[in-house]
Image (tube, helix red, strand yellow):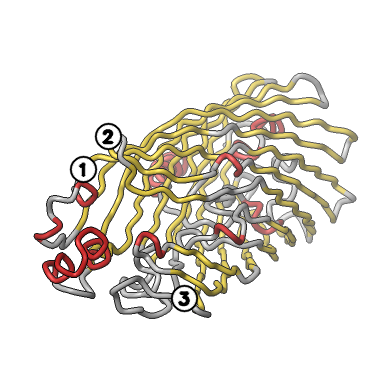
Amino acid sequence: MRLKQTLLGISVASALLAMSGNASASAFALIEQSSGTGNAYAGGAAAAEDASTIFFNPAGMSRLNGNQVTVAGSFIQPSAKFRDTGSTGAALQTAGGNGGDAGSLALVPNTYIVTEIQPVLRFGLGINAPFGLQTKYDPTWIGRFQAITSKIQTINLNPSLAYQMSDTVSLGIGLNYQHISGELSSAVNYSAAAFSAGGGALLTAVGGPGVEGITTMTGNDSAWGYNLGVLIDVMPNARIGLSYRSKLKYNLKGTVSFTSVPTALAASPTLQNGDVNLPITMPDTFSISGFHQLNDKWDMMADATWTGWSKLQQLVVTRTNGAVVQNIPENWKDTWRVAVGSTYHYNEQWLSRIGLAYDQTPVPDAYRTARIPDSNRTWVTFGGQYKVSVASKVDFAYAHLFMKDAPIANNQAATGAGILVGSYSNSVDILSVQYAYSF
């Protein structure tokens, strides 16, 4: 009883932490939701090894006996380093450096609980963070008028049901209540704004070249979605899983603020602190996975996941009166992620995992920005599991994401933000640990 109470306490703590996050799947999606890191999440919708199946395929709960709690965390260390190959600094401003490493270490926790209601019916609850992003540059870098800090955080509550229709077919359904918060900051070129509005006289009035400040936009919202799954045993040692997670539509409401506004520009409507809105749609996903137990020692698994990122075509921040604060074209495209993996069972206590995956970016080269300098990535993963007892087990895994260099040529000279030309050298390292307890 004391252990169960401790696990539930940890679950609550995970919920409070779950808004942490740094993207490691394409764009700002977070796939680190289970013990499957060691297999590169191959077979995610078909493996159904523990309670974390709630996220990948709720139908998989039908394969679990009794009750189970899992608590997990992934330490994600992304790296995003810009190399300048011909940028033009913002008008009337000093150029600045390359911005340092925009990535930062983050902890992404999750927890799942499954309980057996009837022999054919199970209820589960997942608490996780499906999306997350944080990039942060040196505040004096050459691209500061395009981006300094970009942050997206989510927390998702996912109650689910699984029903075993027959010996070979199970169905699953879940609701998702997701909260999102975001922050975008960049430098503001007051010198260029003054010269554009009033020529040399107004430029002199604000203090000449080199006058700048910081603008920060923050907002949050909540939305409802759903997820569906089916798990089919095609033969005694092989199964196929199909899973769908719906899109979520948000309208973030928050504020925009400006620092160090010169007195000569204080009356400008575009530089007023105030309320803002940002509509954004999080993508839906569809997965098909396979799992095959070859023999007593080897398991093989594979997965293909489609993500509907094309729903994100632009980011438009507006004031409550309809005035546009910022309009960023994105023109993202739908993506596929494919993965294969295998598990080797040494004995009843130990097993090892390996995996390989290819993950497309939704970001076209022509529309890449400093806020999300994303690129295609290849996952190489390995991990293992140790059964502490009949009722408990620990999973651990490491993943390295090799990412293609990402060119950028973002022309924002018309807004006084300069032209950012160069390439990004990106990579991600992930260390995951999960504890599962059955009772």
Q: Give the SS element for disc 2.
A: loop
User: Visible in this render: residue 360?
Assistant: yes
* Structural distance between the alpha carbons of marks 1 and 3: 32 Å
10 Å crowding of disc 1: few (<14), some (14-19), many (20+): few
Front-most of 374 and 90? 90
Tag 3 residue: 87
* Structural distance between the alpha carbons of marks 1 and 2: 8 Å
Tag 2 residue: 320
Q: Quadrant of residue 258?
A: bottom left
Counting residues from the start of the chain, the first of labels 1 and 2 encountered is 1
- Provide residue 418's location: percent of width, then percent of height: 40, 68
Q: Give the SS element for disc 3.
A: loop
Counting residues from the start of the chain, the first of labels 3 and 2 encountered is 3
Pointer 1 and pointer 2: residues touching (CB < 8 Å)?
Answer: yes
- In the rendered image, the quadrant that contains the C terminus is top right
Which of discs 3 and 2 lies nearer the camera? The answer is: 3
- Provide residue 123's location: percent of width, then percent of height: 57, 26
* Structural distance between the alpha carbons of marks 3 and 2: 35 Å
**Residue type, mark 1 in image:** Gly
- Provide residue 152's location: percent of width, then percent of height: 42, 50
